[in-house]
Image (cartoon, grey):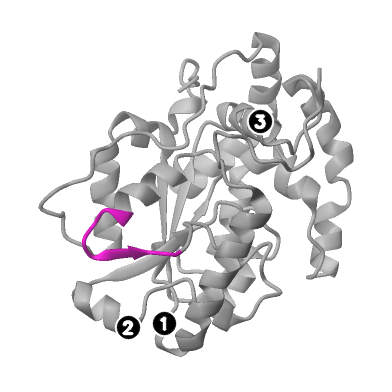
């Protein structure tokens, strides 16, 4: 089998060569930095988790007449991999006060970077820059989420392991000491933590605890992805209530974006992961004060 160039973009994601796309984005943001002082920081962040429907939710919100999304893309990643950049650079991704005023007094802006929730410095960096922002967290059956992430990382060329099981076997060694190194050196970015933490990212309880330790729990709106997929209109209404926005005259068309089939996992692998996530799931249910569909005997799904 021919090995893909590491980090190469799959055609499902972009047909524009990566260097050219990056150059265009840099020029666009650079021009907007000229008036960055007139660009308020975001009102909300979709902080994660990866492969939990964050792209779809962001697209739905961006269609609201009083929501102005980040530009040139939904994920700025300032609080994870781009934190060496200036706050002025971050501001350049958001609309000017004049444009916000034109959209209405209740207009909001925000971005979606699903690595934030898992990044060791995410909570502290967000707290320092936008302490009053609304934080939206989407959570999915961690067994299904892990497999979906593996499929995406493999398709994009970030994963060399030919099977999901092999990637799971490699994960502990790949992640060993990486979180500690990142905490000790804020300038260090871990490729393994970003692209190969298939099971670790699904241990949601310690991640949510870290964010709740730094933010009022009322600032964090958690969404169960399975419920979002089953009834996106209801989840959308809940997010609008959280952001203080009215239902628009024309609700968005609720179709899935960036979806990837999650079927095909071996039963033994599913059982292995279910056992690993049993205790973190119990902790998560306590934190949320509710039962989760995937923790019931027949709750896990391939959706």
Check the image and report above or below for 175 versus 296: below
Percent x, y of residue 130: 49, 76
**Which of pointers 1 and 2 lies earlier in the amino acid sequence?**
1
Check the image and report above or below for 96 versus 23: below
Q: Is residue 7 left or right of residue 103?
A: right
- Which residue shows up at 63% across the image and 63% down it? 23
- Does the stretch in magenta take in 179? no
| Total marks placed | 3
Q: Residues within 10 Å of mark 2 (few under 14, many from 20)?
A: few
Please report contact status of discs 1 and 2: CB closer than 8 Å, yes or no.
yes
Return the mark for residue 39. Answer: 1
- Which residue shows up at 84% across the image and 59% down it? 180
Percent x, y of residue 242: 30, 60
Q: Residues within 10 Å of mark 3 (few under 14, many from 20)?
A: some
Q: Which residues are magenta?
A: 62-71
Front position in the image: 203 or 159: 159
Which residue is most to the top?
Answer: 267
**Disc 1 secondary structure class:** loop
Instruction: Find disc 3 in the rendering and name its residue.
Output: 155
């Amino acid at each position: 089998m021919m090995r893909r160039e590491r980090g190469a973009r799959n055609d499902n994601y972009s047909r524009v060569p990566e260097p050219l796309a990056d150059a265009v984005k840099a020029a666009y943001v650079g021009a907007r930095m000229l008036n960055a002082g007139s660009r308020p920081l975001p009102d909300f962040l979709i902080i994660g988790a990866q492969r939990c429907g964050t792209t779809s939710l962001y697209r739905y919100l961006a269609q609201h007449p009083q929501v102005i999304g980040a530009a040139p893309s939904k994920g700025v990643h300032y609080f994870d991999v781009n934190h060496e950049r200036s706050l002025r650079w971050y501001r350049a991704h958001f609309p000017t006060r004049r444009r916000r005023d034109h959209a209405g007094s209740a207009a909001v802006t925000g971005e979606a970077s699903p690595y934030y929730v898992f990044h060791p410095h995410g909570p502290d960096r967000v707290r320092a820059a936008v302490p009053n922002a609304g934080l939206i967290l989407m959570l999915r059956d961690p067994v299904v989420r892990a497999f979906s992430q593996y499929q995406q990382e493999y398709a994009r060329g970030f994963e060399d392991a030919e099977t999901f099981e092999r990637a799971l076997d490699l994960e502990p060694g790949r992640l060993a000491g990486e979180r500690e190194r990142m905490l000790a050196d804020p300038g260090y970015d871990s490729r393994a933590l970003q692209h190969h933490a298939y099971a670790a990212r699904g241990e949601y309880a310690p991640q949510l605890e870290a964010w709740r330790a730094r933010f009022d729990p009322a600032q964090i709106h958690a969404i169960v992805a399975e419920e979002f997929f089953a009834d996106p209109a209801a989840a959308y209404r809940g997010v609008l209530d959280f952001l203080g926005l009215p239902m628009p005259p024309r609700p968005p068309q609720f179709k899935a974006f960036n979806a990837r089939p999650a079927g095909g996992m071996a039963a033994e692998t599913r059982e292995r992961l279910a056992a690993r996530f049993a205790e973190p799931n119990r902790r998560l249910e306590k934190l949320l004060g509710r039962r989760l569909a995937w923790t019931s005997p027949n709750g896990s799904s391939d959706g």
